Amino acid sequence: MNLSSPIGIFDSGIGGLSVARSVRERLPAEDLLYVADSCHAPYGDKADDFIRERMHAITGLLLKRGAKAVVVACNTATTAAIAQLRESFSVPIIGVEPGVKPAVLATRSGVVGVLATPRTLQTHSFENLAARFSSNVKLLVQPCPRLVQQIEALDFDSAMTRDLLQEYVSPLLAEGADTIVLGCTHYHFLAEQIAAVAGPDVTIISTQDAVAREVARRLEQHGLLAADGREGQAGFVSTGDQARFKTQLDTLWGEGGRIYPFS
């Protein structure tokens, strides 16, 4: 490992590309290696033991390829198993969690809604997070089954996707929510559509920029920042269909991303 070693980033699919984009903007000198575990997406309906097994396997792959830090760019994986991952590996490991804290600070009505996968909302970690920051607000949780699949299919504007967003967002608005947390990294890619359903008076909270700041802080803390002035490169790996992944990558990251085999 050296200062030019890559930052490893992984998610169950393409949602973590939103985090990777923010890391790239904040740390342009850093190389990135992104793994989409698309063969097993979404994690939101998987058991903790399965998620832990996948997290260990992918982290092992990233370290084998020289990663100097690992970003778990998946709310479900973070809330389900990041503690065990940190016990098993010595490199800095940064997770993501729903932005409940900034939402509590932002709300004016005192009602905050959280959109997330069913599995994220069922974890003890999320329950503890909600308990820490929701004593003075009403916190509404809305599981969103099927939404990740729409995003993985790049189906952002279809009638089905619009109907799902109405189904998930409308109950929060009916209860008076003026702030909505995007509790899954996939949902960033529907932020504009969610905002359109919610209306102009509702604040949408996403956390990818906060995660990028934490990555920068941890690398600086450990003396692992790449030298200024170099142009970082990005590589991508998927456990799923490679042609589909290329289409996803071209759409959400840009053409020319280098795709490596999962091995």
Image: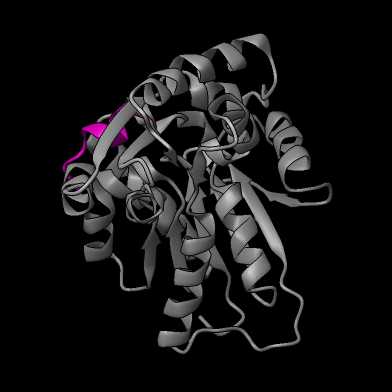
Query: Is 188 located above or below residue 95 in the figure?
Result: above
80 or 234: which is nearer to us? 80
Could you tell me residue 42's position as x and y percent?
44, 29
In the image, is 24 to the left or to the right of 174? right
- One can see residue 54 in this view: no
Q: Tell me if residue 118 is in the magenta stretch.
A: yes
In the image, is 221 to the left or to the right of 86? right
229 or 205: which is nearer to us? 205
191 or 146: which is nearer to us? 191
In the image, is 53 to the left or to the right of 127? right
- Residue at the image point whose x is 57% and y is 41% from the top: 188
Principal secondary structure, stretch drawn in magenta: helix
- One can see residue 72 in this view: yes
Query: Is 235 located above or below residue 197 in the figure?
Result: below
Residue 109 image-quadrant placement:
top left
- Residue at the image point whose x is 34% and y is 39% from the top: 112
Q: Tell me if residue 10 is in the magenta stretch.
A: no
Could you tell me residue 125's position as x and y percent?
20, 47
Could you tell me residue 178's position as x and y percent?
43, 37
73 or 48: which is nearer to us? 73
Q: Which span is picked out in magenta?
A: 117-125
Residue 4 image-quadrant placement:
bottom right
| Identity of the residue furthest to the right in this view | 255
Could you tell me residue 180's position as x and y percent?
43, 38
